[in-house]
Amino acid sequence: MIKSNGFKKVNTAIFISGKGSNLKNLIKFSFSNKSPIKINFIISNKKNAKGLNYSKKFNIYSKVYNFLDKSKTEDKILKDLRKRKIKLICLAGFMKILSKNFIKKFRYKIINIHPSLLPKYKGLNTHKRVIENKEKFSGCTVHIVNSKLDSGKIILQKKIRVKKEDNYKTLERKILKQEHILYPRAIRKIFNL
Ligand code: GRF
């Protein structure tokens, strides 16, 4: 659990690589008085990530890091996080795996959203695999990030039924909608709200 210091919202960084629908959703959430977080840093490993447009739109500082030398890059990121007094990291479609060292050195929480019912379907192409395996249920999970991929302690999970007529595109759409409800709830939960 993270303690929010009185009424002051906790400085939060969102890490993205793609379209950033979760980022947009978290920014909107952060404006509400139900939110314990303030988003003041957006980090991307891709300079053309569509989600970066929300940096301009909502006037939130963003920075792109190339991960050619992962350990150097992570050191830079840690320095920048410290400078901005970031106390929570939310991964939202961030496609790089953070090192053990980074996770250890960032003394606060790192959380992630994953589009499956973890521990099932860790990794990529979850919806495709769910459809191929004719699963009856799928969903999404918000969890604490540890050094193993998609394996940290689960904060919250939402289960949905996979219908016969679903394909991986319709499933992705349905689950993304649920992600946008689940992520803010999970954040409130880690602040004990
Ligand atoms: C989401 O499905 C998230 O669960 C996964 O990557 C996708 C990111 O979507 N980790 P977006 O960029 O937030 O729209």
Image (cartoon, helix red, strand yellow):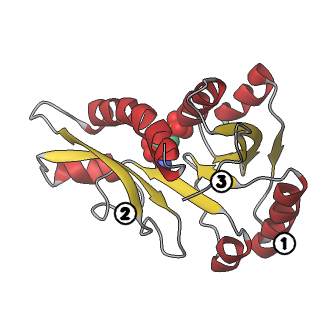
> Is residue 129 depicted above or below 122 in this figure?
above
Is 146 in front, or is 44? 146
Closest to the observer: 112 or 38?
38
Give the residue type at disc 2.
Answer: Lys
Task: State the SS at label 1.
Answer: helix
Viewed as shown, does residue 164 lie left or right of 167? left
Disc 2 to disc 1, C-alpha distance: 27 Å
Q: Residue at x 70, y 37 (%)?
A: 7
Name the image quarter holding the N terminus.
bottom right
Q: Which mark is residue 72?
A: 1
* Label 3 environment density (alpha carbons within 10 Å; few <14, some 14–19, many ≥20): many
User: Which quarter of the figure has residue 169?
Assistant: top left
Q: Amino acid at mark 3?
A: Ile
Q: What distance separates the C-alpha of mark 2 from that of mark 3?
A: 20 Å
Q: Which residue is mark 3?
A: 89
Pinpoint residue 4: horizontal percent, then vertical percent.
66, 48
User: What's the mark number on residue 51?
Assistant: none
Whether disc 3's CB lies below 8 Å from ligand 1 is answered no
The x, y position of residue 166, in whole percent, is: 18, 33
Secondary element under disc 3, as helix, strand or loop, is strand
The residue drawn where x is 33% and y is 52% is 126
Q: What residue is shown with label 2? A: 122
Q: Earlier in the sequence, mark 1 or mark 3?
A: 1
The reply to whether dot 2 and dot 1 touch (C-beta < 8 Å) is: no
Secondary structure found at label 2:
loop
Q: Is residue 48 visible?
A: no
Residue mark closest to the camera, 2 vs 3: 3
Q: Furthest residue to the front? A: 6
Circle nearer the N terminus (2, 1)? 1
Tags 1 and 3 touching, CB below 8 Å = no
Residue farthest along the top direction in this orientation:
57
User: Where is residue 2 shown, x and y percent of the image?
Assistant: 60, 56
